[in-house]
Image (tube, rainbow, N blue to C red):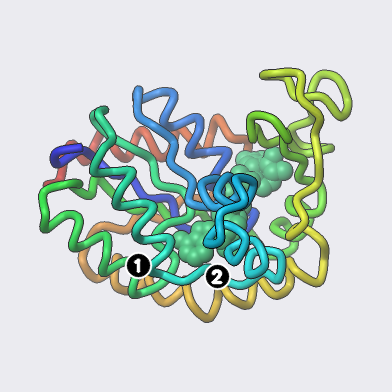
Amino acid sequence: MKNGRVIVLLGPPGAGKGTAAARVAGRLGYEHVSSGDMLRSAARAGTGAGLRARRLMNRGRLVPDELVGAIIREYLEKFPGDGVVLDGFPRTEAQAEMLDRMRGAGIASLAGVFLLKVPEEVLVERLSGRRVCKQCGAVFHVCALPPREPGKCDACGGDLIRRADDEPATVRERLEVYRRQTAPLIDGYRTSGRLWEVKADDPPERVVERITNRLGRAGNRE
Ligand code: ADP
Ligand code: AMP
């Protein structure tokens, strides 16, 4: 990608980043790029790095910056399209600096950073009811966004499973890791004038509309 537009979705686990990212990307003709999905597929491929990543993910910890940063950079460098919606990256100050360097190197331009805001009790409820397709990764919720046929993916018919890291003790750890390592990014993006806060405890269509309306008004900022 040469100076392609990057839209970053920021927010705690369960805020709806993946759900909104897929829809925003679909609307704009961009690609939904999820660092979590990329790491899960590396883990399934059984590479050394993938298996090390899986151990950390299952404990609710972050995977090392260098590993995630290299995966994202390589992907964006090769990506042929106009823009991406980044879901789950950056997650630390070091990763935000890596993204800055990708901007400096002419790989990406930052169209905006959207912070999805959801009360903590809703996060916990969302993660406990989350189900994902084993085959294509599509995301559902047993109550709020149920599949047409229980346990089966609407998109590909694959089996829906619960993520290993959505178990309550791991969710608590992930929320704590978010507070400690990711929330500090908010101030930096706010100060640079690139951050927009989005109320995200509403149906996905509303959340997506808030993001795309804001992008439409802002135009291309870089
Ligand atoms: P994140 O990527 O931020 O961890 P997900 O997009 O995977 O979050 O969403 C977490 C859970 O909440 C999923 O079960 C998803 O179906 C559900 N969900 C996401 N967005 C909404 C929404 N706007 N309203 C209701 N449920 C939602
Ligand atoms: P997610 O699918 O975004 O909920 O991410 C699931 C898990 O993957 C996280 O809890 C981390 O262990 C790991 N992960 C995803 N993105 C990153 C990242 N940018 N940096 C470090 N670890 C990540």
Distance from the alpha carbon under mark 1 to that under mark 2: 12 Å
Q: Position of residue 160 (x, y in %)?
A: 80, 34
Element marked by disc 2: loop
Q: Amino acid at mark 1?
A: Gln
Q: Is the distance from the Cβ of mark 2 to the nearest ligand 2 atom less than 8 Å?
A: yes
Q: Is residue 59 above or below residue 116?
A: below
Q: Which residue is mark 1?
A: 95
User: Pointer 1: residues within 10 angstroms few (<14), some, or many (20+)?
Assistant: some
Residue 83 or 120: which is nearer the viewer? Answer: 83
Q: Is mark 1 within 8 Å of ligand 2?
A: yes
Q: Which image quarter has ligand 2?
A: bottom right
Q: x and y percent of residue 105 in the render?
A: 11, 54
Residue furthest to the right: 150
Give the residue pinned by disc 2: 62
Asked whether, in this view, residue 178 is left or right of residue 174, the answer is left
In this rendering, position of residue 138 left or right of residue 152: left
